[in-house]
Structures are given as structure tokens and as C-alpha cells.
């Protein structure tokens, strides 16, 4: 399979691969290795009690195709400094276009979407616990 | 960055330079460009001489009679001619075929087509090492069986089937015809068509440093095998395969086969060299841990090494090694479909492990430095992907 230059770059560098620890870190995962795609995100929020807080850092682990790894890496890079939300910085359809992901692989981006939403919820929940 | 290391010799080989030179002599006005079917002038006579010399070279290389060699466009056509040719000719004797799930698509797809036409096909499942037990064949044979089609060397895992044993069973069972797809065999192991007991055998040139686009079907004369032709229009190749022969392709196949069998000492020396390289490759990659070998080593040709990698996704693995290595996942013919190898699935590998497999195939130009580069590339890719995957 041929990959776009963007996909190749993020797949080959995968700079945000890893895990985070410490306060205000939420973790969420989706998919299964058995099904061929599994993604986990760690999201670290800035400290504070505001309902809308910014993401300090995001990391991912992924078992999946090059598109899955590249998109997860890009999402982490793009998320830093933005307000934490359940939605990805772009919709799965827009990410498909950006990374030239074949239509039959849209399901894999939905796994990324689910993992991100779970991590964002966990991060926000962790922050609430920290505040109380 | 240097060019990727080529370890896909089972997909195809480069044409030997001497072979290419001989082919070139059959193309231009100064050479043997005539139509070998032209009997009215010297140009045709010379081309026909080249074709017949090549036929003799191929026959001598595989222990066949020259009259048993039928030129085709490659092993796929040879397989089609064998399967449909036998099926059409012997259809009044019965409509049952026995083959294996691990055959090449060039055998499986014709069998599927025959099923659509009302034939029954028994697909044998090999054991986990890739071997089809002759006893399985014996149990599968019926009164209606007219053909057994079994490959000699498997194109994905390199396992070698016991053709002689299967041939003996077929002979005992009222002379059921045995077709052997030997596209991968020549140059990797000894072929003697006469003593193999096979009725039909498919050969390919481009797996053995010859050109693409030419192959042959060996049709046993002494066993009196009959075939119905699949194409008509000229009556070439004893009416079995009409069409003007491509003199340069045929000459190339003859030259490649002659070259490969020219010196028995060289053949054994090369086999030992390849075996040592394959062993080095296996030891280097095995050290990573979580690597499974597909096909029993004791039954495989040394040119092929098929490995599955635990905790690594297949497409990512191939993408990661691609800048450094030219290898296959499954067979090259199946790669376009991006599906898990049906051969590995038939051996009992689960879908994930079948997808995360790489086939390394070594050849004449493979060096120790190539193997070391391959080990490093695989180690880097697997280690990185396992880290990204949290393993």
C-alpha cells in the first residue's frame, strides 16, 4: 500500500508514542488487538479548577496499521495547548482526507475517536477528583 | 540511502546476464527473429532450431523427454492447461478433483471454476508443518476422481511435498492423474519428472533467473496422458497450445535451465551457501523473541524463510521494513488484496499472526551483508512497533 507523505512522516517518527504519569492524567482506550486495532491515549491537563482546561501533553500507544499510528501521533501533537474536549481536533472524515486514509479504514479512525473520548473523560474526571 | 535488500526471489528473480544476451539475439534483424512456425524459409528454420534446442535444455534439466515439454506463458497458464485440460478430456470418467488448501491461486481458482461447472473438489488441509500426508490423499480418492493437483515446493513457506509417494498412490488408484505445480521447485531442489511419477508438471522460468512470460507444462508421454486444449488457432505445441511461440522467451528459459544444472558441484555449493545464509537470518531474527517459524524447517527448502511476529501489526511491519527490505507478506500475488495469508491460516495460524508474517526468499545474489542488514531492519521495526504498541 502507498501512503501519503504526511502519513509516512508521522508513522516513521511517532513522536508522541508513550504514556504519561502523575496528576491530572486521564487514560482511555478502545479497540482490541485481536480485531487488529487498539489505541490508548493519555491526556494530561493543566492544574486548576476551571471547567475548561487546557491539555498540557498527550501520548498514545497503538497496535494498528500505519494510518492508525500516524493519526494517533498527529492528534497528540495537535492537542497540546488546546482545551480538552471529547471530540478529536478534526472529525474522523476530515482526518481520512488529511491522511489520505482509504474509505474502508474509516472504522480504525473511529477507534481513535473512541479512545480519545474515553481519555478526555478520564482526564476531566481525574481533575474533578483533584479539586475535591 | 542505499537500495532495499532484495529478499523476494520467490516472487521473481533477475534474468541472468548471459540468459538476457541469448534472448536479445532472437529479437533483431541480425538475430534469430523469424517465426518458428514458418517452414518455408531459413529464418523460420533457424528460429525453430532455437526453440527445439531450448526444449531439449529444459527437458534435460528436469529429467523429461523433449516431446513432453509444452511451452506456455508461465506456470499459471501451465496449471490452467493441466487442470482444465484433464478435466475436459476425462470428464466422462468422473468429476472429482483432489487438491490442498495451500496451493497457489493458479490452482485453486481453476478448481473453484470447475466447482461452478458442477465438479466436486476436495481441499486437503495440511498439518501445522505444511505437509500433506499421503494418507490424506488416499482417503480422499474416490472412484470419480480424475485428478490430484499438489504443489511440490510451497511458494509461501517453502515446504516440500512427497510427490513420489502421492504418485504411487494415484497409480494404485486406477491411474488417477497427478499434476504437480513445480513453479517454485526448479533451482531449489532436484526435479526428475520421469522418476517422480507425476503425469503433469508446471514450470516457470522467472523463478530461476529466466524471463517472465514463459513457462512449460510437462505432459508425460510414457503414461499416455491426454489433455483437451484450451486455445485454438495454429495447432502449435502438438495442438495443445496454439499461438506463435516467443522465440526469445523460450530461448531464455532454456538457457536459464541449462545454466542452473550445468555443474553439480556448483549446485551443491550454492545450496550450502544459501542454507548458511538462511540459518544466519533465522538466528538473528529469532533473538528478538516472539517470532514463530512457519513450515517445518526439516521439510523446507533453504531459500525460503517465513516468520510470524507476535505483538506486531502486519501492515505496519511491512511499511516499517519497506525502505530497507524487499520482502513479501504471503505471496506477491495475494499482497494486493491485503488479506491474511490463506496458506498460513490453513496451517492453523490465527489471523493476527498470519497477517504479521514476512516471507524472506534468498537467491543467487544474496550476501552475508544483505542478511545482516535484513536482521537489523527487522529488529528495528519490530522493537519500535512493539514499543508503540505498549509491549
Image: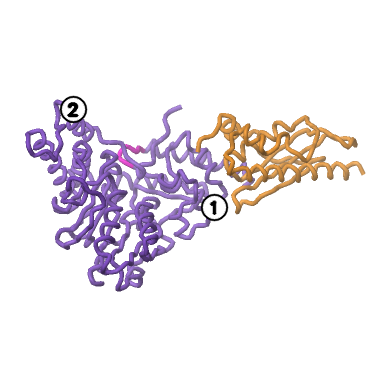
Do badges 2 and 1 share one subunit? yes
Instruction: Judge left or right: residue B82 versus residue B308.
Output: left
- The chain holding disc 2 is B
| Residue drawn at the location 57% of the way across and 42% of the way down | A65
| Residue drawn at the location 35% of the way across and 37% of the way down | B367
| Residue A124 in the image, given as x and y percentages of width and height | 83, 42
| Residue B111 in the image, given as x and y percentages of width and height | 36, 58
In front: mark 2 or mark 1?
2
The region drawn magenta spans: B363-367
Whether residue A18 is in magenta: the answer is no
Label 1 residue SS: helix
Instruction: Judge left or right: residue B301 versus residue B377.
Output: left
Q: Which mark is residue B352?
A: 1
Whether residue B366 is in magenta: the answer is yes
Q: Which mark is residue B5?
A: none
Asked whether B101 or B121 is in front, the reply is B121
Amino acid at each position: 500500500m502507498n501512503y501519503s507523505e504526511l502519513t509516512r512522516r508521522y508513522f516513521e517518527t511517532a513522536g508522541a508514542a508513550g504514556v504519561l504519569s502523575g496528576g491530572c492524567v486521564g487514560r482511555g482506550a478502545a479497540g482490541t488487538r485481536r480485531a487488529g486495532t487498539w489505541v490508548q491515549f493519555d491526556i494530561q491537563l493543566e492544574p486548576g479548577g476551571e471547567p475548561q482546561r487546557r491539555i498540557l501533553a498527550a501520548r498514545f500507544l497503538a497496535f494498528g496499521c500505519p494510518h492508525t499510528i500516524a493519526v494517533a501521533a498527529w492528534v497528540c501533537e495537535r492537542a497540546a495547548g488546546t482545551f480538552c474536549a471529547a471530540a478529536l481536533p478534526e472529525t474522523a472524515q476530515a482526518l481520512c482526507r488529511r491522511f489520505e486514509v482509504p474509505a474502508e479504514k474509516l472504522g480504525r479512525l473511529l477507534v481513535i475517536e473512541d479512545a480519545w473520548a474515553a481519555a478526555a473523560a478520564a482526564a476531566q474526571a481525574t481533575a474533578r477528583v483533584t479539586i475535591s | 540511502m542505499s537500495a532495499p535488500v532484495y529478499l523476494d526471489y520467490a516472487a521473481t528473480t533477475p534474468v541472468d546476464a548471459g540468459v538476457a544476451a541469448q534472448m536479445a539475439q532472437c529479437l533483431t534483424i541480425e538475430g534469430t527473429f523469424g517465426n518458428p512456425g514458418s517452414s518455408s524459409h531459413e529464418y523460420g528454420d533457424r528460429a525453430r532450431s532455437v526453440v527445439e534446442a531450448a526444449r531439449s535444455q529444459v527437458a534435460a534439466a528436469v529429467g523429461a523427454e523433449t516431446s513432453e515439454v509444452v511451452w506456455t506463458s508461465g506456470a499459471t497458464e501451465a496449471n490452467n492447461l493441466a487442470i482444465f485440460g484433464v478435466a475436459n478430456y476425462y470428464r466422462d470418467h468422473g468429476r472429482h478433483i483432489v487438491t490442498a488448501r495451500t496451493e497457489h491461486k493458479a490452482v485453486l481458482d481453476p478448481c473453484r471454476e470447475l466447482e461452478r461447472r458442477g465438479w466436486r473438489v476436495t481441499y486437503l488441509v495440511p498439518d501445522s508443518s505444511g505437509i500433506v500426508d499421503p494418507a490424506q490423499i488416499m482417503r480422499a480418492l474416490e472412484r470419480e476422481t480424475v485428478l490430484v493437483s499438489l504443489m511440490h515446493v510451497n511458494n509461501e513457506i517453502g515446504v516440500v511435498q512427497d510427490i513420489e509417494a502421492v504418485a504411487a498412490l494415484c497409480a494404485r488408484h486406477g491411474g488417477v492423474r497427478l499434476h504437480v505445480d513445480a513453479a517454485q521447485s526448479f533451482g531449489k531442489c532436484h526435479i526428475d519428472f520421469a522418476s517422480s511419477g507425476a503425469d503433469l508438471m508446471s514450470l516457470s522460468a522467472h523463478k530461476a533467473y529466466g524471463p517472465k512470460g514463459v513457462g512449460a507444462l510437462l505432459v508425460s508421454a510414457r503414461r499416455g496422458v491426454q489433455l483437451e486444449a484450451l486455445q485454438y488457432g495454429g495447432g502449435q505445441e502438438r495442438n495443445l497450445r496454439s499461438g506463435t511461440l516467443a522465440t526469445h522467451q523460450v530461448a531464455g528459459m532454456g538457457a536459464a535451465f541449462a545454466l542452473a544444472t550445468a555443474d553439480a558441484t556448483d549446485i551443491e555449493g550454492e545450496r550450502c551457501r544459501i542454507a548458511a545464509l538462511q540459518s544466519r537470518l533465522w538466528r538473528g531474527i529469532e533473538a528478538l523473541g516472539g517470532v514463530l517459524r512457519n513450515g517445518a524447517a526439516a521439510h523446507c527448502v533453504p531459500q525460503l524463510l517465513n516468520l510470524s511476529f507476535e505483538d506486531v501489526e502486519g501492515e505496519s511491519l511491512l511499511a516499517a521494513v519497506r525502505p530497507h527490505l524487499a520482502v513479501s507478506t504471503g505471496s506477491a500475488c495475494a499482497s494486493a488484496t491485503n488479506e491474511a495469508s490463506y496458506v498460513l491460516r490453513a496451517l492453523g495460524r490465527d489471523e493476527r499472526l498470519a497477517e504479521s508474517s514476512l516471507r524472506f526468499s534468498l537467491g543467487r545474489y544474496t550476501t552475508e551483508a544483505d542478511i545482516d542488514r535484513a536482521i537489523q531492519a527487522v529488529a528495528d521495526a519490530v522493537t519500535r512497533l512493539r514499543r508503540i504498541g505498549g509491549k
